[in-house]
Amino acid sequence: MTHFSTNLKLDEIGRVVSVGDGIARVYGLNEIQAGEMVEFASGVKGIALNLENENVGIVVFGSDTAIKEGDLVKRTGSIVNVPAGKAMLGRVVDALGVPIDGRGALSDHERRRVEVKAPGIIERKCCARAYANGRLDETFNCGTISSNSFEANALEYSILVATTASDPAPLQFTAPYSGRAMGEYFRDNGMHALIIYDDLSKRAVDLSTNVSYYYEDHAVVKLIREIRVGSVARLKAMKKVYGSLKLELAQYREVVAFAQFGSDADPATQALLDRGARLTEVLKQPLIYTTTN
């Protein structure tokens, strides 16, 4: 009786009623929260999204072929979260933060929720300082990014969150949010962090309905906001050049639209057209690839 303890761990479990198309219907999880992670008997994880009176709709983070009717489903008690911390540097993980680089389990780390409330307006500071990113204009083959990063030792200070076209849609959708959560750890601890997405078109286009136009436009608006922030934080030397170039190119585009209807132009207008044409040629970038929709 000396070692007797009443500390018991109670797990709420349910059973799979039906499964198909990446969605499992589970009965018996009466206390589950929206967005909570669950684990199936096969080890596959899922997230509870649709809470109904009779059952719970769970999006499966894996192959639903490993799940069958009657399988046990266990609550984890935690909202979807991923590992974060310096121990993540140099690792390649999937959308749930599970290592896929063959280098073993993660060392000391903390867990952070994938979905968190963004800092309020009062808490945020104005962007006024440039963040040097190096040669980010370099392009590379997405299929060889991991091996090239190893060769250049870039992964020593990077975290690569990877999903492929063969991964389930829920994992592909979650990947950018997981990467953001990992990056916010460094931000919240007073360090600089840069996150690069490749590519968000998989999450900005919905082929099944007409709302794709809204999603695409919403993504473009977000990009414009990022550009505005970048212009505020430019170096003074760049601002001096960039400001005049932007104005000259805007004037050029306005005048060139009318110039095509007539050949006569005064010297000032002709000089503006000539300079605008030269600036356009200077700023042109070589064609990297072509694609069609």
Image (cartoon, rainbow, N blue to C red):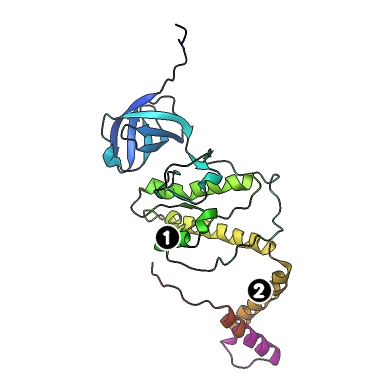
Q: Is label 2 in a helix, a strand or a loop?
A: helix
Question: Magenta region, mostly helix, strand or loop?
Answer: helix
At x 69% / y 56%, what residue is drawn?
A: 127
Tell which circle, 1 or 2, labels the residue nearer the N-terminal end: 1
Of badges 1 and 2, nearer the viewer stands: 1
At x 65% / y 91%, what residue is drawn?
A: 265
| Displayed quadrant of residue 251 | bottom right
Q: Is residue 259 visible?
A: yes
Question: Would you place residue 68 above or below residue 280 in this image?
Answer: above
Query: Residue 93: horizontal and vertical position, in percent?
Result: 44, 48
Instruction: Find out whether residue 180 is within the magenta segment.
Output: no
255 to the left or right of 14: right
Question: What's under tag 1, amino acid-wise?
Answer: Ser
The residue carrying mark 2 is 246
Q: Quadrant of the N terminus?
A: top left
Residue range (magenta): 259-277
Q: Is residue 114 visible?
A: no
Query: Residue 71: horizontal and vertical position, in percent?
Result: 28, 30
| Displayed quadrant of residue 234 | bottom right
Q: Residue furthest top?
A: 1
Q: Separation of disc 1 and disc 2 at Cα?
A: 39 Å
Query: Residue 21: horizontal and vertical position, in percent?
Result: 30, 43
Q: Quadrant of the C terminus?
A: bottom left
The residue carrying mark 1 is 147
How many other residues sit within 10 Å of disc 1, few (<14), some (14-19) or many (≥20)? few
Query: Residue 283: horizontal and vertical position, in percent?
Result: 58, 78
Instruction: Find out whether residue 262 is within the magenta segment.
Output: yes
At x 45% / y 49%, what residue is drawn?
A: 175
| Displayed quadrant of residue 279 | bottom right
